[in-house]
Image (cartoon, rainbow, N blue to C red):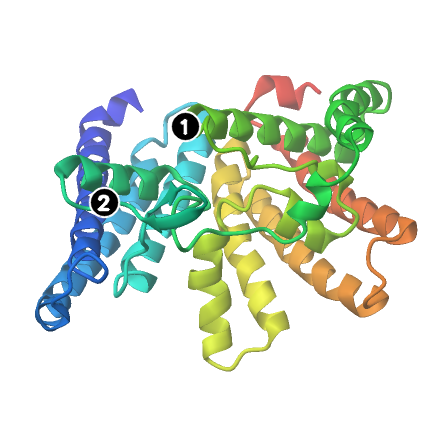
Amino acid sequence: MLENFWLFLPLLLLAILTHVGTLALLANKRRTLPPYRKDVKQSNMDDDHATSMITDFGVLSAIVTLAIPFTAYDAAPLNQAGLRAMCFFYACKILDLSLTKRDEPPTRLIRNGTSLEPGPMTTAWDLTLYSWSLLTEMRYHSFDIAVTQRGRAEIHAKPFWYKLLWTIGPLFLLPTATYYLPIAGLKATCLLMLIQHALELVHKTFHYDHSEPEFLLPFSAATLADFWGTHWQGAASPFLQSLAYMPVRKFGGSRAQAVLAVFCLTGIWHGWAAAPLCTRPWLLGFEVWVLFVGFGAGILVEKWLWGKRQGGIVQRLCVWMYALGFAGVCWRTLELDSKIDIIRSA
């Protein structure tokens, strides 16, 4: 990265500026719309110009953000992978905001007693807080477009011993099992657990006052659909819905096709991010893409096989064996061709 620092830095600054510009335009447009402005006629007159600027800034920001990792090709493999994952996420996030939410930007809500009402949009601080929340909140929990993951209320109602078992249990059992039985699937599961706790720590750092965790007992999931729709973080749900699921449905695609489109986009994201870790990047990237498309197909198959009788012990065993088997193939490729010594020597 140091060799390309003078190319990396301008792109990074341009990405930050265009992100800030897009968020500022969204905040400014939000305050020109009801309930903040009563003059709907004047709002409509300003609408086309504001919408065009939001789109232009958002698309430019996404392109520049995706270009940043290409200037860091000589960085350490883990740094490259992390940079790619983050840049892809924020490129899709800004596209979601600038293309699908440009006409009516989301409203930030504040609690007033027992009810929620639109937050103020008068001062520069109000606009800054709006933009910061829009940028950092993964599931937009402060906005009227908040993503709610189904089934979480039922999990919160579980007894304390159940939550303790699925919180503490994997922390001890998975590393121990992997030590004595170092198969690829278990190693991939330990990586999954590491990602879970790292991202949860980031979430708590930025949103310490938000009670809902990003991850909710993910290893207790009984089905693939529950794992991705209820237990896992759901941070990418807003842009996966608007950039993959809804376009397919809008143009006449079936629910099955839309689900596969979601996991296809997710696979591109994760495959592109994982590629720098391997001396054969396209092989690992393709395998990771197939892994996620396989998850999408698995969700459809389990729905077809078990119908309304979801969550039984047989299904739990089948879907976890299926998931770990697929993940193990990717991990084995990474072990054989990894650029990281500690992984290759494992």
The mark found on residue 167 in the picture is none
Question: Taking 254 as reference, is 66 above or below it?
Answer: above
Between disc 2 and disc 1, the foreground one is 2
Residue at 59% x, 64% y is 260
Quadrant hosting residue 102: bottom left
Q: Is 11 situated above or below 315? A: above
Image disc number at residue 120: 2
The three-letter amino acid code for the residue at tag 2 is Pro
Callout 2 crowding tier (Cα within 10 Å): few <14, some 14–19, many ≥20: some
- The numbered dot on residue 206 is 1
What is the C-alpha distance between the residues marked 2 and 1? Answer: 21 Å
130 shown above or below 101: above
Image quadrant where one finds the C terminus:
top right
Name the spot of residue 282 as percent of width and height, x first.
53, 46
Residue at x 82% of width, y 59% of height: 310
Q: Which quarter of the image is occupied by the N terminus?
A: top left
Element assignment for label 2: loop
Q: Is residue 135 left or right of residue 123?
A: right
Question: In terms of sequence position, does the residue under pointer 2 or pointer 1 come before the other?
Answer: 2
Q: Residues within 10 Å of mark 1 (few under 14, many from 20)?
A: few
